[in-house]
Amino acid sequence: MKKTVVFPGSFDPITCGHVSIIKRALPLFDKVIIAIGINALKSTYFDLETRIKMIQSVFANYETIEVKSYSGLTVDFCTSENANFILRGLRTSADFEFERSIGQINKQLHPEIETLFLLTQPEHTALNSSIVRDILRHGGDVSQFVPAEILPYFK
Ligand code: ADP
């Protein structure tokens, strides 16, 4: 069976931390689906279409990567995509505590789906999309925090 993993998130916007986790997952899976979760109750800095385009521009030359969006439960999206794995990145113990309950409940709901975690590289521990958005709001330079391919979207 093909090994497909879903990497869910908001990606508002994609950062070097996300890119690093995705690239490290590539040799482990046949297919990596970068899945943008749509939360109607949460407003985002970049609209869905722009977030998809930004991610596609980063991974244009990667045949085993797909970019999709979904609403509803991540586990239901995994089932619809025949994916038996969910990938998450861990930066801090706070990430771990947050992920632990979701991962355990998801396992109860869908025992066939495994959630796997990759530890962030030390240089990406402090990085998150919210900090990037704050810098952008105030006209700062985010070029060391995001992949170069998405810089044109900030102009
Ligand atoms: P969410 O809203 O689900 O947290 P994000 O887009 O913020 O969505 O993150 C998606 C995934 O990427 C999560 O597993 C998150 O822990 C991981 N991630 C985000 N930033 C980093 C980083 N700097 N290093 C490693 N993993 C990260």
Image: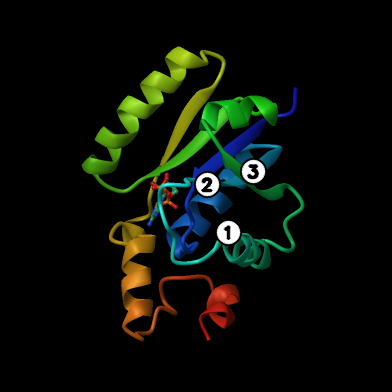
Query: CA gap, disc 2 to disc 3?
Result: 15 Å
Count the numbered circles shown.
3
The structure residue drawn at horizontal position 77% and vertical position 52%, both measured from the top left corner, is 63
Which residue of the protein is positioned furthest toward the left in this rendering? 93
The structure residue drawn at horizontal position 43% and vertical position 13%, both measured from the top left corner, is 108
For the residues labelled 1 and 3, say whether their Cβ atoms are less than 8 Å apart. Answer: no
**Which picture quadrant has residue 48?**
bottom right
- Of the numbered discs 2 and 3, the one sitting upstream in the chain is 3
The structure residue drawn at horizontal position 47% and vertical position 45%, both measured from the top left corner, is 39
Q: Which residue is mark 2?
A: 38
**Residue 33 - label:** 3
Question: Element at badge 3?
Answer: strand
- Of the numbered discs 2 and 1, the one sitting upstream in the chain is 2
- Of the numbered discs 1 and 3, the one sitting upstream in the chain is 3
User: In the rendering, at what x and y percent does residue 126 appear?
Assistant: 28, 60
Q: Is residue 40 above or below residue 114?
A: below
Query: CA gap, disc 2 to disc 1?
Result: 8 Å
Question: Element at badge 1?
Answer: helix
Query: CA gap, disc 1 to disc 3?
Result: 16 Å
Looking at the picture, which amino acid does disc 2 mark?
A: Ile
Question: Element at badge 2?
Answer: strand
